[in-house]
Amino acid sequence: MVSKKLPKTDQFKGIEIRDYQLIEEIGRGKNGVVYKAYAENIDHYIACKIIPKNTLKRGWIIELKKTAKLTPVEQIVDYLFCDFINIDETKYVCIFYEYINGDNLRNFVKSNENAITLTFIDTLMKQILEAFFGMQQVGISHNDLHEGNILIYYDRLKMNPQIPRIKISDFGIGVSRYGLKPKDDYKELARICHDLLNLIDPSDLDGKDRFFYDRFLEFIQKRILEKNPTVGTFVQNPEELITILKQIPDEYNSIDIEKPTKLTHPFDYLRCEQIGNSFELLHLLYSQNFPGYDDLLRRNNTILTGPRGCGKTTIFRNLSLKTQILAGTTEGFSNNFVGIYYHCNDLYFAFPYLKSSLDSDQRKAIIHYFNLCILYEILDSLSETFNRFEDRISEREISIIQDHLMTYFRTYQPSPEGSNALRHLMSFASGEKKAVRDWFNNKRKKHAKMPDFLPLDFIKMTSSFLQKNINIFKDKAIYYLLDDYSLPTVSKELQRTLNDFILFPSEGTEHFYKISTESIVTFYPYNSENKLMIENREYVVVDLGSYFLHGNSSMVEDFLLNVINNRLKISENIDAKYHDIRLILGDNPYESYNELARQLRSGKKVRYYGWDTVVDLCSGDVANILELIKRMFEAVGPDNFSKSDGVEIPLEYIRSDKSKATHIQDKAIREAGNEFLQQIGAIPEDDYGTQLKKITEAFGHVANWYLRNENSKNLDTKPPHQAFRIEMQDAIYLDENSKKIYDNLIKYGIFLRDIRGKSQRGNVVDRLYLRRLLIPTFKLTPSKRDSVRLDKDDFLLLLKKPEMFKNTQSIKKLVKKTKHVMDDEQRKFTDE
């Protein structure tokens, strides 16, 4: 470890550097020690961090100079100057900062645990995001943010001296030359705030505090941790994140449980996480007729996947008993199943830095923690049922639940007479979760006491107990709805450990796991013994994107119609005339895809618009379609829809556009596709964002080349070749780098993989569909008749050298035309 190279305690005490004397050591970390320094001539204190020079990464001085530009940022410790000293033939770097008379967050929490309130965590989050904004402006990351370099202090010169304030230190020097990977600042901020939230027992919270706790937790999971720029402009955007965070209290104030919630604007809350805990609104915006509904509810362990924005979280939350209870409905009691919702980001925060191999006790601890999480969610659902529908669960049932759990927990003490037993159990479960986290993270320390692990069949036995003894569970299957079980957040080691457990057949009890994952490549289908979990044996896959590719077109249209029209009807300021999106958008400008293709080939100006066109552009990404229609409404002016004569429908041109130069729908459709393409390029370079954008553009270019130059085969009318699908001609074996690129094309929903595949030469090979939102960008049609057929060399060329792939079709055609006039050497050369 680098720390072994650090100097002894107080080794530099008394040394003078630039008129400042090092008077006491006040801290040490993995890469350096910190002294308090004093200049007597000006009566001034500063801090000095001393680091062995040979441990610093190359270019550290450049990074350090960047931090000088952060001086105006109040939440960042000011860098002052740098110097060098030689002691015992070792060269040390001395970095001088402003001195903060406070403590780091780690020590502050230990000595002030009662000070860790929701207000404290909220303030900390906002101040660090403000620091991130300044860092973003000068192009610097911290790369080693942790509790040790977040300083908490009180400023007596401020108007409110009792308010704790923060400063971030150690910029530019957090990563050593010894190969440590830089830490993601947003991921570390999420972990820090989540750990602070764990110091608060949510079962002790009511009303506004409980609402804020749940929303803040969701904000961390769905906003701070989000890295996919195609999801929205808030991704790693500190300014937008602060705005969203500030809106949470207003959301609570606007909730009225007693009457149906209305939307202010029909395209508010495009994604489930924006709705938060407004359960009635969540329920109102939900449509049960989504493609795949019946398959998802079959009694199997199920992997639910689909492109971002297809509604996986909305579906799971609405299937949960808790959402139905909090929405004020009783339909959850009449279903033939009970849904228990759990968000898997909680697993990441509990076990953020797992090693590639775990011992038996560590695996048992992870399963024990998971058991406790599921138990907590069961208790929470029962508690809400008791609070709102007291007649559905009796005091006797609560008592026997407590008796059942006492057989598993030796240290549990029954709740005092007259207290809320379910809340008491929830508080106990929270404490047990903390105990296992503490043991896991301090396992090597001598004082660390191993918890008593629950048996592996705890959920099975508890599910069976509930089904036999608790009325609302009787004769019903239990679906444990595990949301966002996705790599890399839920790591391979976590998935391998839990797959042993959650994908094991539930013999003797009707409980099943429904697992949502970002895409099929973010589910790791192996167990702890590295055994492959077989699809259609241990689990089935429900891919929502596949239903939009191959499902009945009228079913897809009905679903979208229901989702959009429902929003129009429950919006406050939408006149009844505009409650049908079909009338608002009108008909397509072309009678068939073949007609559209011929117009594109002829070079005519083509416009994309009409209800059928919008349906055709949906790959299951409902949020993108809602955003697309929102653009159209905003172009006209949303307020105009409040009057029956406010908008001319179908939407075509703004009234002031006398020349009819810009078609409202066409402009919105093209902008949506172009923005999505740009967002692909903004994907982090760790995930090959720039390369993914080049691949998308190269394929779009080739698909357009086919439309302009080739005709569909076996059709007498010889329409242009229309394809947005890649069809492999061979089974493809990818090297490690190509496999990562391919997986990210699927993960980010740039291409949708047809899970059915196609048989080619004895192998089932992938078929990939370009995200339909990009069809207008590359001047294609939504026809699924044709495909771009690629052999393994062509496909590898697309992944590795997309710029070269872009021109392969025209080169091949030229060679084919001229090959008959070539000699043998020339033919050999062109074949190569």
Image: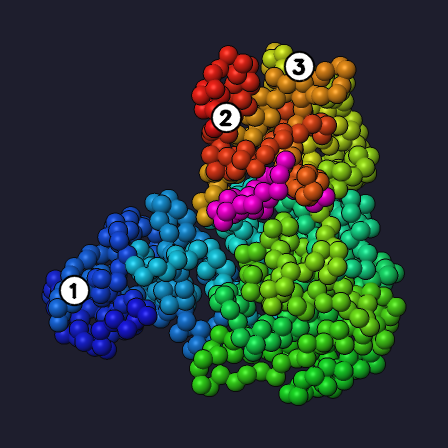
| Observer-nearest of 190 and 706 | 706
Question: Regarding mark 3 in the picture, which secondary structure is present there?
Answer: helix
Q: CA distance from mark 3 to mark 2?
A: 35 Å
613 above or below 128? above
Which quadrant, please, contains the N terminus?
A: bottom left
For disc 1, the marked residue is 91
Q: Nearer the viewer, residue 282 or 495?
A: 495
* Amino acid bearing label 3: Gln
Residue drawn at x 73%, y 37% is 549
- Specify few, some or many for label 1: CA neighbours under 10 Å numbering under 14, 14-19, or 20 or more: some
**Residue at 62% in and 81% down:** 453
Secondary structure state at the residue bearing disc 1: strand
Task: State which mark lies toward you, 1 or 2.
Answer: 2
Q: Which numbered disc, 3 or 2, marks the residue closer to the eye?
A: 2
| Magenta range | 729-757
Residue 576 horizontal/vertical position (percent): 80, 33
Q: Amino acid at mark 2?
A: Asp
Is 168 on the left-hand or right-hand side of 527? left
Q: Is residue 125 above or below residue 228?
A: below
Q: Position of residue 161 (x, y in %)?
A: 38, 65
The first of marks 3 and 2 along the sequence is 3
Gap between marks 3 and 1 measured at Cα: 72 Å
The x, y position of residue 323, in whole percent, is 74, 59
Q: Quadrant of residue 108?
A: bottom left
Residue indicated by mark 3: 599
Q: Is residue 694 left or right of residue 786?
A: left
- Decide if residue 506 is in sight here: yes
Which numbered disc, 1 or 2, marks the residue that appears first in the sequence? 1
Q: Which residue is mark 2?
A: 831
- Residue 427 image point, x, y percent: 64, 77
